[in-house]
Image (tube, rainbow, N blue to C red):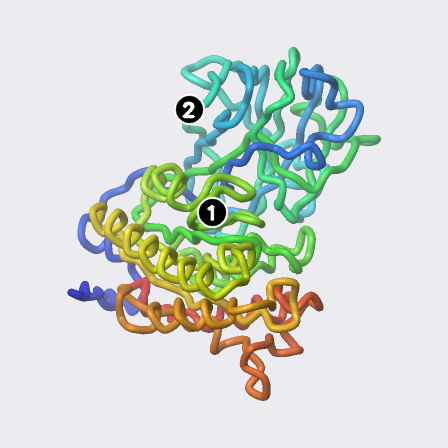
């Protein structure tokens, strides 16, 4: 297939995103995202914040997120994609955490900004809808943790709500309105994000979206440590490119798993994101691992994954988004290690390596055990022979050539 040329270094030697070099214009670019999902029963807000058909009534929700791109103006996105009723946001604030940490409940009160929506402090988000806040002035450096606090007076009148369960970041719930409080003593912690789906900044930079499963969502990483491999990649890029993690544990390419399939969510989670120039596609192991282990089924799932990858390529290229394909990691010794599944993984990886993508990220080669290539390197294995530990995630991030984002 035709390869797109990469733009090089600016005269100053600074890595400049291709879109910014081409236009130099300032526009809204995502600095942080999370993939919206229907919240499973086990990931609903803890008692007393979940009642039958009523969630977070008279409750304050404080969350922290880590932006990968800096800016002086920002706006928030809240999603009610899977809500069974209107999402009534009574009041929202943003601030910097007191000590800069992810998962903190204390904030720097001098940095508190009230968030408005078309000039109003409250907003009702319709079922299935997304709401974007008014812009506000708050300077953020790349890698800054940002605290977002929301109060729901009436609560959401449904047992179906939108969240991102795999936050690996602690949020805090407390009865009453505490959106501007310095701290939330006695709050109930929960390691999930709810409702918040994006933070945008005004920038000339561009972003790379990561479409993936639990290996990108960060299972095996450190809670409040921001050491998933997309986080480590963002650290390497030093704020020159936004890294937008649109992964979810249990997700699949071909069929719904935890969250809609990649084919079903591509428009929302990639094409509708602001300021995106690149896609890293690193998903498919759950399709192989949950398919029938008989040989005909494995041949089918490999062929179907390859066809799906081509669909994703075609749809992304239509929006001038370059697609970098990542090889699937070994899973020998895990619960997926059965039947002809390893053959399917190798078939898919051979296709990925055959120059169909704009570039290939050989994650398989980065973390496989040279002595047993069907297994993960022991130093990278979290222990279940499927997911990585922080060392393994660092190895994946280091396997991504930064020149791909020039």
Q: Residues within 10 Å of mark 2 (few under 14, many from 20)?
A: some
Q: Which residue is mark 2?
A: 134
Q: Residue at x 32, y 41 (%)?
A: 271
Query: Is residue 111 among what the camera can see?
Result: no
Q: Quadrant of residue 349?
A: bottom left
Q: Report whether 188 appears left or right of 155.
A: right
Relative to 343, residue 288 above or below = above
Residues at marks 2 and 1 touching, judged by CB atoms closer than 8 Å: no
Query: Is residue 257 among what the camera can see?
Result: yes
CA distance separating discs 2 and 1: 24 Å
Relative to 14, residue 123 above or below = above
Q: Which residue is mark 1?
A: 246
Q: Nearer the viewer, residue 403 or 247?
A: 247
Q: Residue at x 35, y 54 (%)?
A: 279
- Choose the circle earlier in sequence order: 2 or 1: 2
Q: Nearer the viewer, mark 2 or mark 1?
A: 1
Q: Position of residue 288 (x, y in %)?
A: 50, 59
Count of marks overlaid on the render:
2
Q: Position of residue 405 (x, y in %)?
A: 32, 62
Q: Residue 359: which disc? A: none
Relative to 51, residue 284 above or below = below
Under circle 1, the secondary element is strand
Position of the C terminus by quadrant: bottom left
Q: Position of residue 39 (x, y in %)?
A: 61, 33
């Amino acid at each position: 297939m035709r390869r797109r040329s990469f733009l090089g270094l600016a005269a100053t030697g600074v890595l400049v995103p291709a879109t910014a070099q081409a236009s130099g214009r300032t526009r809204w670019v995502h600095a942080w995202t999370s993939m919206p999902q229907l919240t499973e029963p086990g990931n609903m807000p803890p008692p007393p914040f979940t009642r039958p058909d009523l969630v977070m009534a008279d409750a304050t929700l404080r969350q922290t997120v880590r932006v990968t791109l800096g800016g002086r103006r920002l706006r928030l996105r809240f999603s009610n994609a899977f809500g069974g009723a209107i999402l009534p946001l009574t009041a929202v604030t943003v601030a910097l955490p007191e000590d800069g940490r992810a998962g903190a409940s204390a904030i720097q009160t001098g940095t508190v900004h009230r968030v408005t929506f078309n000039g109003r402090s409250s907003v009702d988000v319709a079922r299935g809808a997304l709401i974007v806040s008014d812009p506000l002035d708050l300077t953020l450096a790349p890698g800054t943790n940002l605290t977002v606090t929301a109060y729901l007076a009436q609560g959401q009148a449904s047992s179906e709500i939108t969240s991102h369960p795999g936050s690996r970041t602690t949020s805090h719930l407390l009865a009453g309105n505490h959106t501007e409080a310095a701290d939330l003593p006695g709050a109930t912690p929960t390691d999930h994000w709810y409702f918040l789906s994006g933070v945008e900044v005004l920038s000339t930079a561009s972003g790379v979206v990561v479409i993936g499963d639990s290996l990108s969502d960060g299972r095996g990483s450190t809670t409040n440590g921001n050491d998933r491999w997309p986080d480590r990649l963002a650290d390497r890029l030093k704020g020159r490119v936004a890294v937008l993690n649109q992964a979810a544990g249990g997700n699949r390419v071909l069929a719904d798993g935890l969250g809609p399939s990649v084919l079903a969510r591509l428009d929302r989670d990639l094409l509708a994101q602001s300021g995106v120039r690149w896609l890293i596609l690193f998903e498919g192991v759950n399709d192989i691992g949950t398919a029938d282990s008989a040989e005909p089924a494995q041949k089918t799932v490999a062929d179907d994954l390859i066809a799906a990858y081509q669909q994703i390529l075609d749809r992304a290229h239509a929006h001038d988004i370059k697609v970098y394909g990542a090889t699937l990691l070994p899973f020998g010794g895990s619960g997926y290690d059965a039947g002809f599944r390893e053959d399917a993984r190798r078939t898919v990886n051979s296709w990925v390596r055959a120059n169909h993508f704009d570039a290939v990220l050989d994650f398989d080669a980065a973390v496989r055990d040279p002595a047993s290539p069907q297994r993960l390197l022991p130093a990278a294995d979290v222990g279940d022979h499927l997911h990585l530990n922080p060392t393994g995630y660092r190895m994946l991030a280091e396997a991504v050539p930064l020149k791909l984002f020039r």
